[in-house]
Amino acid sequence: MDLFSNLIEGFSVALIPTNLLLGFIGAVLGTAVGVLPGLGPSATIALLLPLTYKLDPVGAIIMLAGIYYGAMFGGSTTSILLNIPGENSSVVTCIDGYQMARKGRAGAALGMCAIGSFIGGLISVLILILIAPALSDLALSFGPPEYTAMLLLGLFMVVYLSSESVLKGLMAMSIGCLLGMVGRDVTYGLDRFTFGSDYLLSGLNFVPVAMGLYGISEVMLNMEKQETREVFKTDLKGLWPTRADWKASWAPILRGGALGSLLGVLPGGGTVMATFGSYTIEKRLSKTPERFGNGAIEGVAAPETANNASATTAFVPLLTLGIPTHTAHALIFMAMMIHGIRPGPLLMTEHPEMFWGVIASMVTGNLMLLLLNLPLVGMWAKMLTVPYKYLVLVIITVCVMGAYSVNLSAFDITTMAVFGVVGYGLRKFGFPISPIVLSMVLVPNLEASFQQSMVLGMGDLRIFFSRPISGTLMAFIALILLFPIGSWLWNRRGDLKKLRQQNNSPAVKANNL
Amino acid sequence: MAKSSELVMSAFFVLFAFGCIAASLQLPLGTPLEPMPGFIPLIVSLFLLFVSLAQFASAFRTAGNSKAVLGEQWKQPASIVVGLIVYSITLDFLGYIIATTGLSLLIIRIFEPQGWLRPLVIAIAVSVFSYVLFDRLLEVNLPDGLLRGLL
C-alpha cells in the first residue's frame, strides 16, 4: 500500500465516532492537566491506564496520545495567566506570554498559542508520515546487538537530557532496571528479588509503581508547598491575532514547527530543547531583539509551535523502533503491550489500523484542540481557581481506583503509597523520575536482546562494537558518558588556572609576605 | 545539614547496591555466552554501586549550601501516605464506600481543620459519585464490605 492509501485507512479508523469521542476525551483531559500545574500528562496517563483495558486497543491509544499532546496545548494557559508553566515545555512561554497578559493582550497570546500549536501539530504529523515508514524499514534490518545498543542509547539519552545531575540520573536508571527485574525469570523460571513474596512473583506491577512515583509524590510535594495561585485578571477578548501579529508570527511558527519536529525525535528532553531553541533562534533573527522579554508575540508563537510539533514527532521512536523515549510514551508502550500489540518496526505491517489510525487521530485531535482552546480559553482559565484541596481529592480517588483495578488487589494501593514515598524522597533529593520508569519498562527487552546478542557473538562483547550500526550507537553512548567527565575536568582546569592567577597576584603575594 | 543529607542519601544507595549485589550473587550467574538470571542484575548492581560511590564523593566535596531537604510541612504528606496504607488494609472489610469516605474525610480535614459537617458531606458525595462511576458505569467491581446486600 502506498502512503496515500495508508492515510485513507488511518482516517477511516480515526473518524469512527467512538475513536473521535475517545480522541476528544483525551484532548479535553490533556488540556485540563496541562492547564493545572502539578498534574502532568504522565501521571494522568498512568491514572487512566487501567481504565483503558476494556476499550478497543486503537481507541485506547488514541485517547492516551490525545492526553499527551493535549497537555502541551494546555500548558501555555498557566504560563500566560499565572507566570507558572503548566508543563516543563511551557517554561519559555512565560517570558513573553505573561508580559503580553500584563499589557492586556492575554487573549492574543492564548489565541496565538492555540493556532501555533495547531500548525506545529500539522507540520509534525506530515514529517511523521514521511519519515516513519523509512525508519521502520531501517529498524527491520536491526539484529539483537543493534536493538540492545538502541535501547541503551535511549536510556542514556533520557538520563543525560532529563537530569540536572548525570550521576543521579544514572542512579535512577539503575534503580529502575533493578525494579524491572523483580519477579520470576521467564527463561529459567527462577525467582529474582522476590524475598519469598507471592505478590512479587509476577513482578512489580507497573501501574501502581508509576502512579505512586508520579501522582502520589506530586500530591505530597504540592501539599508541602501549599502555594497560593493568583490568576492574572485580564480581558480575554481578541483571541484571533491581528494582521500585525500574523505578520510577525508566520515565519517563527514555520521555523518553530520544523525545529520542534526534528528535536522531538530525541529521547528525554526533545520538547524542552525545542522550545528553548526556537525562542533563541527567533531572538537572534529578530531586527528588534529588545522586544523579547517584553511581550513579543513571536516569543510566544515560536516556542508553542515547537512544543506541540516535538510532542507529535516524539511518537516516532515508539511507533517505529518500539522504544519509548518519554515517560508518557513508556505508559503508552505498556498500554499497547497490555492489549497484545508490540510497538516497533512490525507495527506498521501487523497492525496498520493502529499505526495509521493513531497518526490520523493526531490531525483530528489537533483540530479538536484548536476548536476547544480558542472559544473555551476563559473556561480553562477559570479552572485555575479551583482550590487545590478538591483537586487532591480527585487525584487520590483516581489513583486509588487505577491501582486497585489492575488486579482488584488492595495490596496494589499499598505498593502505590510506598512508591509515592519513594518518589517524594527521590524528588526531594533532585533525582529524575523518568529514567526509573523508562528503564523499568525497557529492561525485560534489554535483557532478552543482550542474551541473544551474546549467543550471536559467542559470548564476546565485541559484537556490539564490530557491527556498524551498533558500533556507532555505542560510540554515541560513550560520548554521552564521557561528556560530563570532560566538562568537569575542563571546569576544574579553569578553576585551578583562576586560583593560580589569584595566588600570583601582587595583593596576595603582599599578604603572604 | 543539606550536605550531610546528601551524604546520608548517597551512603544509603551504596548500601542498597551492596544488598542488590548480595542478592544477585545468590542467583546463578552463568557465563557471558549464556547469561543466567543473576548476570544482568549483578552488572546493574555493580554499576549502581559505582555511581553511588561517585555521588558520595561528589557530595563530600560540594559545599553545603543547598536548601534543606525536608520542609516543615512534612506531616501533611505523611498523613496522606498513612491514610492510604490504612485504606488498603481496611478496604475489603469496610467496603469501597465507607473506606473512601474515611480517606476523603482525612484529606479534606488536612486542608480544612475546622468543622466536621461540610467535610463529611463532601467525603460522602465523593465516595458515592466515584462508586457509581467506577463500579456501575465502568464495571470495576469494587468491594461492598459492610454494605454488602445494601448496594
Image (cartoon, helix red, strand yellow):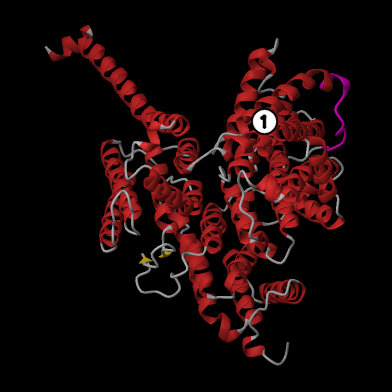
Q: Is residue B113 visible?
A: no
* Residue at (27% x, 44% y) in the render: B53
Q: Nearer the viewer, residue A375 or A224?
A: A375
Quarter containing the C terminus of chain A: top left
Residue B25 image offset from top left, x and y in percent: 25, 59
The residue singled out by tag 1 in the image is A261
* Residue at (17% x, 10% y) in the render: A509
Residue A190 image offset from top left, x and y in percent: 37, 67
The magenta segment is A235-245
Q: Quadrant of residue B3?
A: top left
Residue B109 image offset from top left, x and y in percent: 59, 69
Left or right side of A172 for A317: right
* Residue at (67% x, 89% y) in the render: B147
Q: Quadrant of residue A377?
A: top right
Instruction: Give the prevailing secondary structure in the magenta stretch.
Output: loop
Q: Quadrant of residue A267?
A: top right
Is the residue A275 above or below the residue A432 in the image? above
The residue type indicated by label 1 comes to Ser
Left or right side of A98 for A147: left
